[in-house]
């Protein structure tokens, strides 16, 4: 594939936090960006404005990516507005709230697995259908591309007493990354994951544990929280041709944790 100016990326959950940082950075680097959101239209519009101010092109698209019909519409609308998809960042994710595993309601467990695992799988499937050079997409052969899935260091730490099912959902994301990366390696598509550690976003407060960051920072070897922009840099690298021989792998962005 040629330079970044010909690339289009769909970033799920790009209205806030890590997804917003990924959208802004890829947009500033010449990708046309589909800024997916679910419940924060104003925040998504602000991300689009930021990308446009940096000279880029972006559209905000509302879709709950845990629902198949909305994933299909997201890809159709993104393609209609910005041209063929060449990259996907599967970023949207929820913890389901902090607490002991034994107390977890089944409906919340279903929400976590639906978004963090099924949503990632459905978006990856749609991206592969469109990008594969093997030609099984709606418009014939694709031009290849790259997928980056956002995992979490919780996949290996397990997140005991916080969100064990969330950790397990991220382990599933990593296995999906390895398997898919190998499965589509000969179809011009690379699939990798970034596993962030403790990153400064609203996810911690939203999990109902506002003291979490202060409690965990001392356990981080670099002794600080990471920024969403630091995660975005790793994603940009894995999407780019600089990572042309890297697939089916997980890159940790954890300050050593
Ligand atoms: P965040 O600040 O809570 O933002 C979550 C984003 O996901 C929002 O843009 C939200 O959009 C979107 N979203 C939620 N449900 C969605 C749905 N059903 N469909 C589409 N979008 C949806 O979270 P974050 O901290 O940036 O986390 C981003 C990713 O990084 C997640 O996968 C998370 O597990 C992972 N991660 C985060 C950390 C950390 O310390 N922050 C560490 C490791 C991994 P709306 O507001 O529009 O609904």
Image (cartoon, rainbow, N blue to C red):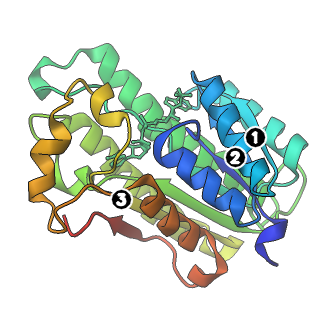
Q: Is residue 254 left or right of residue 38?
A: left
Kindly report which numbered mark, 2 or 3, lies closer to the viewer in this rendering: 2
User: Dividing the image into four equal quarters, which quarter contains ligand 1?
Assistant: top left
- Per the image, the residue denoted by label 3 is 195
First reached walking from the N terminus: tag 2 or tag 3:
2
Q: Give coordinates of residue 131: x percent, y percent.
A: 75, 60
First reached walking from the N terminus: tag 1 or tag 3:
1
Q: Quick check: is the Cβ at mark 3 less than 8 Å away from ligand 1?
A: yes
> Label 1 to label 3, Cα distance in Å?
25 Å
- Per the image, the residue denoted by label 1 is 75
Q: Quick check: is the Cβ at mark 2 less than 8 Å away from ligand 1?
A: no
Kindly report which numbered mark, 1 or 3, lies closer to the viewer in this rendering: 3
- Per the image, the residue denoted by label 2 is 50
> Label 1 to label 2, Cα distance in Å?
22 Å
Q: Is residue 212 left or right of residue 145?
A: left
What residue is rendered at 74% in x and 41% in y? 49
Residue in the foreground of this view, choosing between 184 and 120: 120
Kindly report which numbered mark, 1 or 2, lies closer to the viewer in this rendering: 2
What residue is rendered at 57% in x and 54% in y? 22
Residue 143 shows in the view? no
Quadrant of the image for the C terminus?
Answer: bottom left
Q: Is residue 97 above or below residue 11?
A: above
Q: Secondary structure at mark 3?
A: strand
Q: Give coordinates of residue 44: x percent, y percent.
A: 65, 33
Mark number displayed over residue 152: none
Residue in the foreground of this view, choosing between 192 and 49: 49
């Amino acid at each position: 594939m040629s330079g970044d100016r010909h690339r289009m990326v769909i970033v799920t959950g790009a209205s806030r936090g890590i997804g917003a940082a990924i959208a802004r950075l890829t947009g500033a680097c010449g990708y046309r960006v589909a800024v997916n959101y679910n419940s924060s239209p104003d925040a998504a519009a602000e991300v689009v404005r930021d990308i446009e101010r940096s000279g880029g092109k972006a559209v905000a698209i509302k879709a709950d990516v845990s629902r198949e019909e909305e994933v299909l519409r997201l890809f159709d609308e993104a393609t209609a507005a910005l041209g063929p998809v060449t990259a996907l960042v599967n970023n949207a994710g929820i913890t389901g709230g902090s607490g002991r595993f034994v107390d977890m309601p089944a409906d919340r467990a279903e929400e976590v697995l639906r978004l963090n695992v099924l949503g990632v799988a459905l978006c990856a499937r749609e991206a592969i259908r469109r990008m594969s050079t093997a030609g099984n997409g709606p418009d014939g052969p694709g031009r290849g591309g790259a997928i980056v899935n956002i995992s979490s260091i919780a996949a290996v730490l397990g997140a005991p007493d916080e969100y064990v099912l969330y950790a397990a959902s991220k382990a599933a994301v990593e296995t999906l990354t390895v398997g898919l990366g190998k499965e589509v390696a000969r179809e011009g598509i690379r699939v990798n994951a970034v596993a962030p550690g403790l990153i400064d976003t609203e996810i911690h407060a939203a999990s109902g544990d506002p003291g979490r960051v202060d409690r965990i920072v001392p356990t981080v070897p670099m002794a600080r929280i990471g920024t969403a922009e630091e995660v975005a840099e790793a994603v940009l690298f894995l999407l780019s041709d600089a990572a042309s021989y890297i697939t089916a792998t997980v890159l940790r962005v954890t300050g050593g944790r």
